[in-house]
Image (spheres, rainbow, N blue to C red):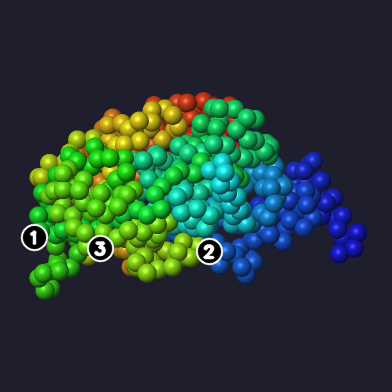
Amino acid sequence: MDTAHRSFPILVALFVLLFGVTSSQPYEEFLQCLEFHDSNITSIVYTRANSSFSSLLESSIRNPRFDTSATPKPLLIFTPRQISHIQSAIRCSRAHRIQIRVRSGGHDYEGLSYSTISPSLTLDLISFRNISIDLAQQTAWIQPAVTTGELYYRIAEKSSTLAFPSGICPTVGLGGQISGGGWGTLLRKYGLAADNVLDTRVIDAEGRILDRASMGEDMFWAIRGGGGNTFGIVIAWKIKLVPVPASVTACTVTRTLEQNATEIVHRWQYVVDKLSNDVFFMVVLNRVVNPIQANATTIQASFNSLYLGSIEGLILMMEAKFPDLGLRRENCVEMSWAKSILYFAGFPLNSPLESLLDRTISATGSAKFKGKSDYVKEPIPISGFEGIWEKLKEVGVQTGGLILASYGGKMSEIPESSIPFPHRAGNIYQVEEVAFWVEDGVEAADGYLNWLRGLYEYMTPYVSKNPREAYANYRDLDIGRNGGGGEGDYRRARSWGSSYYKNNFDRLVRVKTAVDPANFFRNEQSIPPLSSWR
Ligand code: FDA
């Protein structure tokens, strides 16, 4: 391109910036603005007319429910290669009123990182995937599009006795996951991923790069669990690695209704939050083909546990504390902690550790899904479980279920206000209610969504109240949303905000008001600034 051609878009952009001339496409001025900042940058911006647009958009859609022709799409996808690109995108988006949706791993439960009715730009951070581990300090700097699996693999390459207490599914991005908390099999020992963040680099709404010292403790508090796409764009986390034994024990025991599942799950609730911090227990409840009766189905409880010790140690503990489970040696396998992630994620036992690096595998296959969440503070009575079984019988085999994850331990020791994630002491376990379906079309989707909402309604007497608590990373727009494409309203937001953050909600609003008063970073469930109190 000769100099005359190169300077033309720059002059146009300058004119546009100064006089605000409108053009036929809402994003043309934005593109001119980007080019004004960096003449090479437009080669990494994709419009809907670009042949790569759809494949790029789909490359990180982790819920096929939001991969249909009816799903609202961004106007543009931008794949920045360096930090200055992100800063330019922020400045041009502000100037030309295009909303930014940041995407790291694309697992948002409601697809908010790439789908909105507002004119938007999906800022896909896929190139930000560096991991730098300091073994001596037992810390690491990680970029936001690093997945949990990639992180666990790189830690395991360097040490068999270090880990990080983040989520179970290996394809989830740490940009989004730490922004909302991040729980996994180490939560009873070390808390959440967000509890183990030491420092960060964030680009704020002015395009400035901030670290912990320059952003101040209020903003540093807010970004560790207060939700993504709200306070700024995280470009790096400094995390604390945690010690684990070189060999841990993972076990699975399944029980159907015919094998006393109801009584065992009921009993599980009285034990699980009081066990040693070295034990994590998860129970998956769903409808399965009956293993002992042809052409029949039943309800199954699958008890999955991780113990930071030997098989013998866990069996001794279970015989003393939870004999009803009937745990036996053959239910358990010893392995490295990194391998236990593959075990919990449902990979076959002989899978290579490299499977952790595959960011394309889908935890739900081609199934669309919706999740909702709850917290249980008092054991659910037997009759309550019997009603859950009736609900599960309303859907097909393995198309709906509940996942119960044990709390207590370190989770009870961390104060509710330590970070925005407030679900701490007093919770026996967290519940995720889920529905999966492969059928296409609105009618099929509505059937499953209605079933899930019915299950959630059914759970009301058995779960937390005032507020009914929910996990921010299991985003659920049923519990409330900001208006339009994210225009906040403090009073409306308070209702879903209290579910996710309890009494931390108001502090989050104060931080938002201080760091992003114009509500530049927003989505359908971002924290609104106080100015939205109309
Ligand atoms: P995505 O890129 O969609 O981002 C999610 C949200 O964070 C969006 O609002 C996005 O804009 C924002 N965001 C992303 N990157 C950002 C950045 N760099 N700066 C600021 N904001 C940013 N959770 C858990 O705790 N434990 C678990 O085991 C699992 N397992 C699991 C399995 C599967 C299959 C799914 C789909 C989800 C989970 N989750 C989970 C929930 C998961 O933690 C949650 O969906 C995260 O927000 C996903 O983060 P991603 O970066 O992948 O998503």
Q: Three-letter amino acid code at disc 3?
A: Gln
Residue that numbered label 3 is attached to:
398
Contact flag, marks 2 and 3 (Cβ < 8 Å): no
Residue that numbered label 1 is attached to:
258
The percent coordinates of residue 63 (x first, y second) are 42, 59
Contact flag, marks 1 and 3 (Cβ < 8 Å): no
Q: Three-letter amino acid code at disc 2?
A: Ser
Residue at 24 percent of width and 53 percent of height: 312
How many labels, in total?
3
Q: Earlier in the sequence, mark 1 or mark 3?
A: 1
Q: Three-letter amino acid code at disc 1?
A: Glu
The percent coordinates of residue 342 (x first, y second) are 39, 61
Position of 203 compared to 428: left or right? right
Position of 71 compared to 345: left or right? right
Classed neighbour count for the residue bearing mark 1: other residues with Cα under 10 Å, few (<14), some (14–19), many (≥20) = few
Q: Secondary structure at mark 2?
A: helix
Residue that numbered label 2 is attached to:
59
Q: CA distance from mark 2 to mark 3?
A: 26 Å
Position of 35 compared to 68: left or right? right
Classed neighbour count for the residue bearing mark 3: other residues with Cα under 10 Å, few (<14), some (14–19), many (≥20) = some
The percent coordinates of residue 119 (x first, y second) are 58, 50
Residue at 77 percent of width and 43 percent of height: 17
Q: CA distance from mark 1 to mark 3?
A: 18 Å
Tell which tag, 1 or 3, sits nearer the viewer.
Answer: 1
